[in-house]
Amino acid sequence: MWKTLTGTALALFVAIPLVVQAGEHGVMHIEAKDDIDRVEERLRNAIDDKGLTLMTVVDHAANAERAGLSLPATRTFIFGNPQVGTPMMQCQGSMALDLPQKMVVRQTDEGVRLEWNSPHYLAERHALEGCDLPLDKVADVLEGVANDAAGQ
């Protein structure tokens, strides 16, 4: 019996994807393999390759430095596709609080981490259950962008 339980536990551990969702908060993340500049370069390419529009990049560390504070390298990429985001906002106007999509690239003690909001969490947060939206497709695109940027 213990062999079965141990085998099942090991199988579950191995099956856990590299992308992790932080429970009720809806924050997805993945660890990157390279330095932050290389990850940023790959992220820009992945956004472009997926046909998404990069609106801007916010450099939080540079903003902190201008305020006389310090912060590890932290950049928020704001991007999207109006053909996908607009129906979400048509369903519930408050979605504009969370769209366009954002992906944070930041330096941690362990390396470089990419983080983004789960579209399923956002749908729950904004009560989009009555709308027919391609949430799984959006989740797959975001995960693909993150994987590409992380060098996975």
Image (tube, helix red, strand yellow):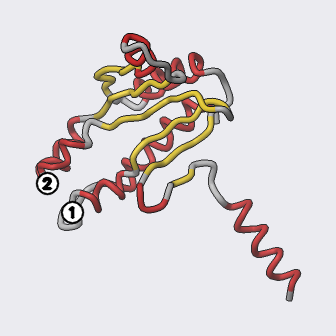
Q: Nearer the viewer, residue 88 or 28?
A: 28
Identify which amino acid the numbered label 2 is placed on: Gln
Name the disc covering residue 88, or none.
Answer: none
Disc 2: which residue: 92
The percent coordinates of residue 121 (x first, y second) are 35, 57
Q: Which residue is painted at 40% across and 51% down in the image?
A: 118
Furthest-right residue in this view: 3
Q: CA distance from mark 1 to mark 2?
A: 8 Å
The percent coordinates of residue 131 (x first, y second) are 19, 62
Q: Quadrant of the C terminus?
A: top right
Q: Earlier in the sequence, mark 1 or mark 2?
A: 2
Q: Is residue 23 left or right of residue 3?
A: left
Give yes or no for contact between labels 1 and 2 (Cβ–Cβ under 8 Å): yes
Judged from the image, the secondary structure of the residue bearing numbered disc 2 is loop
Identify which amino acid the numbered label 1 is placed on: Ala
- How busy is the neighbourhood of tag 1: few (under 14 within 10 Å), some, or many (20 plus)? some
Rendered position, 98 above or below 68 = below
- How busy is the neighbourhood of tag 2: few (under 14 within 10 Å), some, or many (20 plus)? some
Q: Which residue is painted at 40% across and 28% down in the image?
A: 76
Disc 1: which residue: 127
Q: Which residue is painted at 15% across and 47% down in the image?
A: 89
Q: Is residue 6 left or right of residue 31?
A: right
- Determine the image quadrant of residue 111: top right
Furthest-front residue in this view: 68
Q: Is residue 134 left or right of residue 147?
A: left
Rendered position, 83 above or below 6 = above
Q: Nearer the viewer, residue 48 or 5?
A: 5
The percent coordinates of residue 116 (x first, y second) are 43, 42
Q: Which residue is painted at 53% across and 44% down in the image?
A: 29
Rendered position, 74 above or below 23 = above
The percent coordinates of residue 6 (x first, y second) are 83, 76
- Determine the image quadrant of residue 52: top left
